[in-house]
Image (spheres, coloured by chain):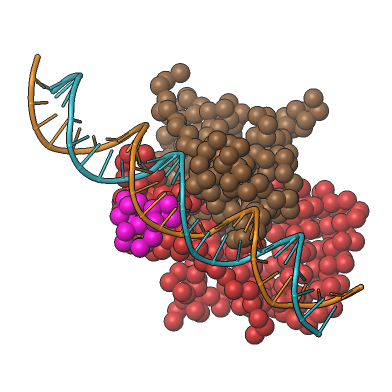
Chain colours: A red, B brown, C orange, D cyan
Amino acid sequence: MPLQPVHRRSVPDEVFDQVLSEVVDGGIGAGEPLPSERRLAEVLGVSRPAVREALQRMAQTRLLEVRHGGATTVRDFRRYAGLDLLPRLLVRGGDLDTAVARSVLEARLVIGPGVAALAAERGGPALEATLTETLDALAATDDDVERQLQALAFWDHVVDAADSMVFRLMFNSLRAAYEPALEALAPVMAEEVGQVGAYRVLTAAIGAGDPETARAAADRVLRPATTSILSGLSALEES
Amino acid sequence: MPLQPVHRRSVPDEVFDQVLSEVVDGGIGAGEPLPSERRLAEVLGVSRPAVREALQRMAQTRLLEVRHGGATTVRDFRRYAGLDLLPRLLVRGGDLDTAVARSVLEARLVIGPGVAALAAERGGPALEATLTETLDALAATDDDVERQLQALAFWDHVVDAADSMVFRLMFNSLRAAYEPALEALAPVMAEEVGQVGAYRVLTAAIGAGDPETARAAADRVLRPATTSILSGLSALEES
DNA sequence: TCCCACCATCTGGTCAGACCACTTGACCAC
DNA sequence: GTGGTCAAGTGGTCTGACCAGATGGTGGGA
């Protein structure tokens, strides 16, 4: 394993993670009050500003409800959390949450073709060249991780071409959840990124400005791996 | 106008909004450094912890890159921001950003049918009753806002039934963007929620456990208003 | 002349303690 | 009951200090 940048964990980061675990893993159910900032600071052995910063960050993501003068209470993350909580939900208690992983694959299969159709509608002539270039880079390497990165770049261009802020933001969130685990996932996804042909068909459809063909082509890019990983996940759930 | 809860804006909230505006509206381009925390505190006339809290919250949403010892730099929100930035992007400079609004409608039209199909696959027998109940409540009122709330509840149940964490989190983020503007949007969306019949067809398809019919029915619920609002938006863009 | 160890000085990270503002609930007078 | 009062607890904010990492200039040595 090559050298990796050390990641420093600041005190508020640590507090954030601990409180988040309490909330997500049900240590403190929805609606229940958190200990006071002073109390938390005392228990965790850190200063109050550190605790405060962590709690405010959680409040920002709608995981806590902070009321001046009153108690800070936990909100139901299933009902209020945004997409940015996904990475934390994907691994729960150190293990992969198969139900969440399944939902990622399903969402991908719904959204990918939709984005491809929009890209076909709107992508200019330069788009096909850009996509082809990326695919050439993908085809040129044998490294699974590098292929993943190129596939990611491919979709990045497609999302750009779709010219949709919502899909762009969704893609950003999904990528943020995917990238940290990219090395671990590269072998699993190898099947998909190995099918360069399917990507080329998709590229042609997008380049031709044909939304429906692009939608179908995107489905053919994404579905095989989705199906096989999905069945792998259900097998995993049995045990 | 009925009495409304007063909303207090804390100092860090204020700082957060100001810095966010600088970042989103391009006052400080991507890659450029922010003034130091001390300097910002001085300029804004607040304490450093207040500034710090705001910056950390922005860093959490990947809008800033904070490095211990080095300068805090602005990241490209278009490439890193998550779905939770949507409300802020929807209104830019006080006005509705029509391109962003368009993308919301398009995304709805892609995701809604996908979620409906999943719900049809997985929803138990109790689901149809729940949905019907919600539709009855929707049909029973003449108030546009109340109808919106019931339609939201309807989709909330559908998302629940789809049993997909990713779609649930997306829905939460979209709802968080939608709800604050609900009163303003109620007249615009009145056309859609008035078509109770289409919702009932969708409910039946979901209840019958037929994914493809449900997908098509969801499309028929969402498309008419989408199309008409979309053309309204392009007319708006002309002027 | 060039290189590099060193250090001043910038940045963010953390803390302690104080005080203000708000909410809550108990208690009391009406 | 109703409303007022008050103490205690909570979050909100500030000040000032010090720690720790990054940066760039500088002077000494090769």
Picture mark count:
0
Q: Is residue A41 visible?
A: yes
Residue under the image location 67 percent in, 83 percent down: A2
In the image, taking residue A72 as reference, residue A140 lies left or right, namely right
Hey, which quadrant is residue A112 in on the image?
Answer: bottom right
Residue A42 in magenta stretch? yes
| Residue B163 vs residue A160, the one in the foreground | A160
- x and y percentages locating residue A49 in the rendered image: 43, 52
In the image, taking residue B115 as reference, residue A31 lies left or right, namely left
Query: Magenta residues?
Result: A36-51
Q: Is residue B87 above or below residue A1?
A: above
Q: Is residue B126 visible?
A: no
Residue under the image location 71 percent in, 35 percent down: B98
In the image, taking residue D3 as reference, residue B225 lies left or right, namely right
- x and y percentages locating residue B157 in the rendered image: 46, 48
| Residue A205 vs residue B196, the one in the foreground | A205
Residue under the image location 66 percent in, 55 percent down: B71
Residue A142 in magenta stretch? no
Q: Is residue C30 above or below residue B126?
A: above
Hey, which quadrant is residue A24 in on the image?
Answer: bottom left
- x and y percentages locating residue B161 in the rendered image: 47, 55
